[in-house]
Amino acid sequence: MSQPEHLSPHGRRLLDRRSFLSTAGLSAAGLGLASLLHGEQLLGNESLTVGGKSPLRPSIDPNRPYAVRPPHFEAAAKQVLVIYLPGAVSHVDTFDYKPALTTFDGQKPPGIPEVTFEGPTGNIAKPFWDFRPRGETGKMVSDLLPHLGGQVDDFCFLHSLTTDTSAHPQGENFMNTGFTMEGFPSFGAWVTYALGTENQELPAFVAINDPRGLARSGKNNFGNGFLPAAFQGTDFNAKNPPSNLARPAALTADADRRTNDLLQRLNAEHLDRYPGDANLAGRIASYELAGRMQLSVPEVMDLSDESAATLQSYGVEDGSELRREYAKNCILARRLIEKGVRVVQLFNGSDPSGGNGITNWDSHSNILKTHAMQAEIMDQPTAALIADMKQRGLLDHTLVVWATEFGRMPFLQANGTGRDHNPDAFTCFLTGAGVKQGFSYGESDEFGFKAAVNPTTVYDFNATLLHLMGLDHERLTFYHNGLERRLTNVHGQVIKDVLA
């Protein structure tokens, strides 16, 4: 075969058939060896996190994806309850007391922008509810939330939170997944991926949606993203149990049990024929959990054994219908924690038709009416839930997170009755295992407009939550599309001042 004269000797050698086959064979062997070494975790150049640390990926048995796994280090919190309030609760009308708002009520001091998220701005507005000192700490809380206000000595407030967006879908995504875009794993998915769960009869991660429906970002708030599907949240609430769990009336309990036993044997035999198929093992494990849930879910949802005093404390029989349904969801949350579910996410607010203060906390107009409507639903049942968990000793090992996606402005919108979105300052609180009690971290400025002392990002917030669960946010990773992905991206510092 003639070869072009302009090729170098090395180039001519590559076109030689015998040399080409020899090189290709060695290359294929090298790739095969690298794959085998990677599978056995024997490669010396293991990929590192952006901080130069080695990843701590959990060792997950595909046959038992929900099995308990050890944390990175010992921590007080073993379970977590996230109470999430879509729509953006006004911090300046609830927990962030700013006397300057009363001093400058009706005025427009220098520095207030002419336009914010939804349009032109109005004047400074004092809180729509009076603030008063609560508890032994004397923490100032508004009359909008009297029940939660009575528990401030147990809470750890973060008053200088900031976020990267002022839009609700992106804000929910950011708070719950660490990214404004969709497709990333939720906080609950990361925790259950890392730790599994104590109770093998119930899902490791349960999302209890508001009686009115899903929040703006829907199932993305409790999705698994690129993590294995086993770690997505299972969503149901006290009114709507998981679908397709009820046994058909024509099928007896004994026949149902024998059918499940047969399926389990057949699945085991099928899995033995394909021992290396992790996806098959994961699917079988999910189906078997669904079978066990036929018994466990009806039991945990049955509130008939709750005492009259408990039902009354939560407000199950009083107030609006929405309040009564949300109160049942709160009891369900406590019962799931009691059963050992690793992560429970309880939603207060939805967004089936835009919200605007009616279905969630997004009060762009008539905040006096709309925030009061949401508080009537949320305040008493949530306070009763926290008090009940404390009385039962559940807070000794459970972290409780009360969160929203951003705050609201200290001045009114041009309509004169609502407050616009504020990504530069908002308040969340923690209570339970591992956090200080009766403590406030960070401050917003005199108007509650921007974080002023110890500004804290959502990355910092999520890093702290993982730390409280015994997880290193920099080393809990999942290799995806060539990157060591993590909940906090490449950011975040643990807020050590809030740790007990």
Image (cartoon, rainbow, N blue to C red):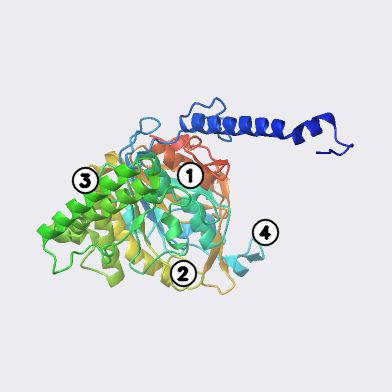
The residue depicted at 35 percent of the width and 64 percent of the height is 210
Percent across and percent down for residue 120 are: 63, 70
Q: Is residue 372 above or below residue 388?
A: below
Q: Secondary structure at mark 1?
A: helix
Amino acid carrying label 1: it is: Phe
Percent across and percent down for residue 310 are: 18, 57
Residue 136, visible in the rendered structure: no
The answer to whether the residues at label 2 and label 4 have Cβ atoms under 8 Å apart is no
Amino acid carrying label 2: it is: Ile
Disc 4 to disc 3, C-alpha distance: 49 Å
Amino acid carrying label 4: it is: Pro
Disc 1 to disc 3, C-alpha distance: 27 Å
Residue 110, label in figure: 4
| 217 on left or right of 202 | right
Labels 4 and 1: the sequence-earlier one: 4
Q: Is residue 425 above or below residue 137?
A: below
The residue depicted at 49 percent of the width and 31 percent of the height is 36
Dot 2: few (<14), some (14–19), or many (≥20) neighbours within 10 Å?
A: many
Disc 2 to disc 4, C-alpha distance: 24 Å
Q: Quadrant of the N terminus?
A: top right
Front disc: 2 or 4: 2
Front disc: 1 or 2: 1
Q: Secondary structure at mark 4?
A: loop
What residue does disc 1 label? 461
Q: Secondary structure at mark 3?
A: helix
Q: Secondary structure at mark 2?
A: helix
